[in-house]
Image (cartoon, rainbow, N blue to C red):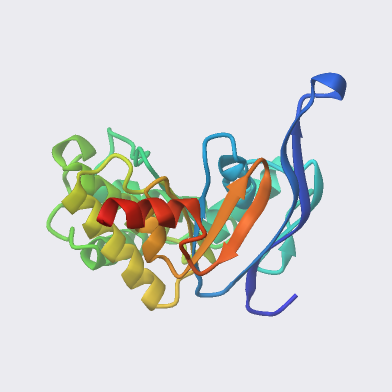
Amino acid sequence: MSATTIVRLAGVEKTYGFGDAGVVVLRGVDLAIERGEFVGIVGASGSGKTTMMNILGCLDRPTTGHYALAGEDVSTLDDDRLSDVRNRSIGFVFQSFQLIPELTVRENVELPLGYVRGARKSRHERRARAEELLASVGLGHRLEHKPAQLSGGECQRVAIARALANEPALILADEPTGNLDTKSGEDVMQLLFGLHAAGRTIVMVTHNPEIAARLPRVVEMRDGRVLRDGAPTRASSFVAAAAGEAR
């Protein structure tokens, strides 16, 4: 595996249930993602993309096969070790933001900084880091607001700032524009494109064919397998849908 390979899935299969009642969701998936790539995961409902994202996020384990994240085989780690990996190496951006409503914007971004085992930052350091990140996403003036006082687009920008808190090797974005209006969604995409340009590694699930058509690399799932992997082309049903809407 290359020193620049952030994600390596090798022969990954996932089955839920046992015996005759088992449901195979992923079927021998091989995937490599290099440092600094921006990859879209697309596919119809039931294609396996959500399960693959759960495995990439160390929220689930493969039934068989291996998953290496930034050179570490995480396939068989116990729950405590997986929790450490998630906090240290992965930044999550969810469709529903997943902000804690009782906390201020700054406190939401500070939160992951308090859970780094063996390298916990002081209160002053956490506060300074959160303020720096919020300023970088254009929300330096909203530090003491609660999520309910923000627009959806602003909430998603807070979520992106939080995802960057511990300098993760990988950012996983699950439908980050799904709950946003067109303008707010475009603002969030521009922010993600900016992070990519700065060298961040991003994997994003999207159901939006127009967004998929703009990504440098798209992995299309079908029936638990990788159907296509590469630059978006009209061969992709998602890109074709975007082209049809544009005509």
Image quadrant where one finds the C terminus: bottom left
Determine whether, in the image, residue 19 is placed left or right of residue 236. right
Give the quadrant of the N terminus. bottom right
In the foreground, 240 or 218: 240
Residue at 79% of width from left, 48% of height from top?
76
Question: How many numbered marks are there?
Answer: 0
Q: Is residue 143 visible?
A: no
Residue 150: horizontal and vertical position, in percent?
16, 42
Q: Residue drawn at (15%, 52%), measured in percent from left and top?
A: 142
Front residue of this view, candidates 203 and 79: 203
146 on left or right of 20: left
The image shows residue 199 at horizontal and vertical percentages of 44, 77
Quarter location, residue 102: top left
Q: Residue furthest right?
A: 19
Residue 232 in sight: yes
Residue nearest the observer in this picture, 160 or 243:
243
Residue 74 % position (x, y): 73, 55
The residue at the point 36 percent across, 70 percent down is: 195
Q: Residue furthest top?
A: 21
Residue 39 percent location from the top left of the image: 50, 63
Q: Residue at the location (53% across, 45% down)?
A: 43
